[in-house]
Image (cartoon, helix red, strand yellow):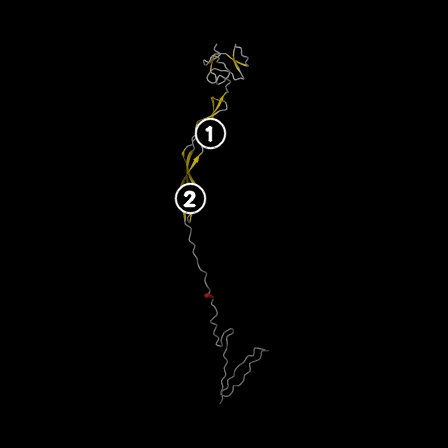
Amino acid sequence: MVAVTTIGLVVACGPQLDPVSLPAPAGVTLSATPTVEGSSGATGTPDATEPSATAAAQPAVTTTKPPTVERRTVTETKQIPFSTRTVNDATLAKGTKKTKTKGVAGVKTLTYELTLTDGKQTGKKLVKETVTKAPVTQVVAVGTKAASRCDPNYGGCVPIASDVDCAGGSGNGPAYVTGPVKVIGDDIYGLDNDGDGYGCDS
């Protein structure tokens, strides 16, 4: 007796046909091995070269060092400018000025808090201000005395004019003085005729 194996074939192209059973040749046994669609071989084993989702590269993790913050206290000194005050002085000729008290600048000490981030200054705050030396006010006297109408070359008061003569004499002025008057500078009016240091004394 001869064994007969029936195989089923499916034709993919053209209209779908019913499976046809064909007898195998005498002494031959035929069998069909199924294949898996998309496989790289006839055994149905998946492609080993296909990348796995779990094998994807993970991003590198970096750590940032927190900044180093430091606070320091420093002091500085600064000048305080002096002020000036004026006062009237009746002993000085009008319009003249004289310093009676010389001004002196003062000194103050300033205390600051500095903030340093990674060694660089990033903040500065004034926390204290102290006057260590008070300034001295400068005092200036301003003269209010009316200008003298007397010639400074003579004691007493010989008027200032283009010419002065002794009153009661033969001179024609235009100004006159009653003597005696002491000559303390130059006898610009010629009042001391005898050279004894006094004018209009005879």
Percent across and percent down for residue 130 are 41, 36
Residue found 46% across the figure and 29% down from its top: 84
Vertical placement of residue 137 versus 22, above or below: above
Q: Which residue is mark 1?
A: 84
Which amino acid type corresponds to the residue marked 1 in the rendered image? Answer: Thr
Residue found 42% across the figure and 44% down from its top: 114
Residue that lies at the very extreme toward the bottom in this rendered image: 1
Percent across and percent down for residue 81 are 45, 33
Earlier-in-chain disc, 1 versus 2: 1
- Tag on residue 114? 2
Which amino acid type corresponds to the residue marked 2 in the rendered image? Answer: Leu
Vertical placement of residue 102 versus 146, above or below: below
Q: CA distance from mark 1 to mark 2?
A: 36 Å
- The local crowd at label 2, few if under 14, some if 14 to 19, many if 20 or more residues have their Cα within 10 Å, is some
Residue found 44% across the figure and 43% down from its top: 124
Residue found 43% across the figure and 35% down from its top: 79
- The local crowd at label 1, few if under 14, some if 14 to 19, many if 20 or more residues have their Cα within 10 Å, is few
